[in-house]
Amino acid sequence: MIASLRGKLLYSDETTVIVECSGVGFKCTVTKNTLNNLPKKGEEIFLNTHMAVREDAMDLYGFYDMEELSAFKLITSVNGVGAKIGIALLSEFKADKLLLYIASGDAKALTAASGVGIKLAQRIVLELKDKVGSLSFGDNDEIIAVSKVDAVSASSEAVEALVSLGYTKGEASLAVSRLDSTLSPEELIKQALKSLARR
């Protein structure tokens, strides 16, 4: 199993890179986020990798950091979700943002990724919501906070109000989760709007 690559960047396009390691060129499929963090051609590059072995092929996927690799493995653990969808989701969203949407149950947001319809997005959320809620991703504890925005009626009311104003459920849940849940819905909405306006 190839867990990582360190070598010279030989080539890159919109979906792949080739990394030369000791005279051998390794072709990796990568996300847009990883592409945006590449060095110049000819310079040294380090990628965390995942190798998928099938009967007719061995494919290598490269990631700029461990958070993105871990998110890829989690997403592709869902039945019927392959590497292509995992790459598409992580090309559309950074890992922490993607997991935030899943933790908050915002399936609609996931449909922004190429090839992800609402039924597939709902399945991903259904299968991973509880798993994501128990994770602390990098230094991002926001996912855990979002998963705890649950039965508190004031918080729920504030989230729904923010969604009706045009924010996604993930954004609204995150903003409300950072506030004191004992506040009134009106105060939660007011403070959440201030927080969202600063972002």
Image (cartoon, rainbow, N blue to C red):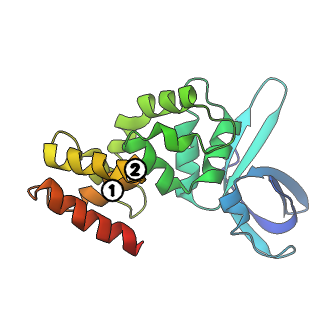
Q: Is residue 38 left or right of residue 112?
A: right
Residue 47 visible in the picture: no
Q: Is residue 5 above or below residue 40?
A: above
Residue 72 visible in the picture: yes
Q: Residues within 10 Å of mark 2 (few under 14, many from 20)?
A: many
| Quarter of the figure with residue 34 | bottom right
Position of the N terminus, as image quadrant, is top right
Q: Is residue 111 above or below residue 14?
A: above
Q: Is residue 37 above or below residue 137?
A: below
| Quarter of the figure with residue 39 | bottom right
Give x and y (percent) for residue 35. Answer: 73, 63
Give x and y (percent) for residue 164. Answer: 36, 48
Residue marked by disc 2:
170
Q: Residue at horizontal 77%, vertical 73%?
A: 44
Q: Residue at horizontal 23%, vertical 51%?
A: 158
Q: Are marks 1 and 2 in contact (CB under 8 Å)?
A: yes
Say what secondary structure mark 2 lies in: helix
Q: Is residue 111 left or right of residue 148?
A: right
Q: Residues within 10 Å of mark 1 (few under 14, many from 20)?
A: many
The image's mark for residue 174 is: 1
Which is nearer the eye, 21 or 102? Answer: 102
Give x and y (percent) for residue 73. Answer: 56, 41
Question: Which amino acid, mark 1?
Answer: Leu
Question: Which amino acid, mark 2?
Answer: Gly
| Quarter of the figure with residue 7 | bottom right
Q: Residue at horizontal 44%, vertical 47%?
A: 101
Count of numbered marks: 2
The residue at the far front in this view is: 165
Say what secondary structure mark 1 lies in: helix
Give x and y (percent) for residue 148. Answer: 23, 46
The residue at the far left in this view is: 182
Which is nearer the eye, 2 or 46? Answer: 46
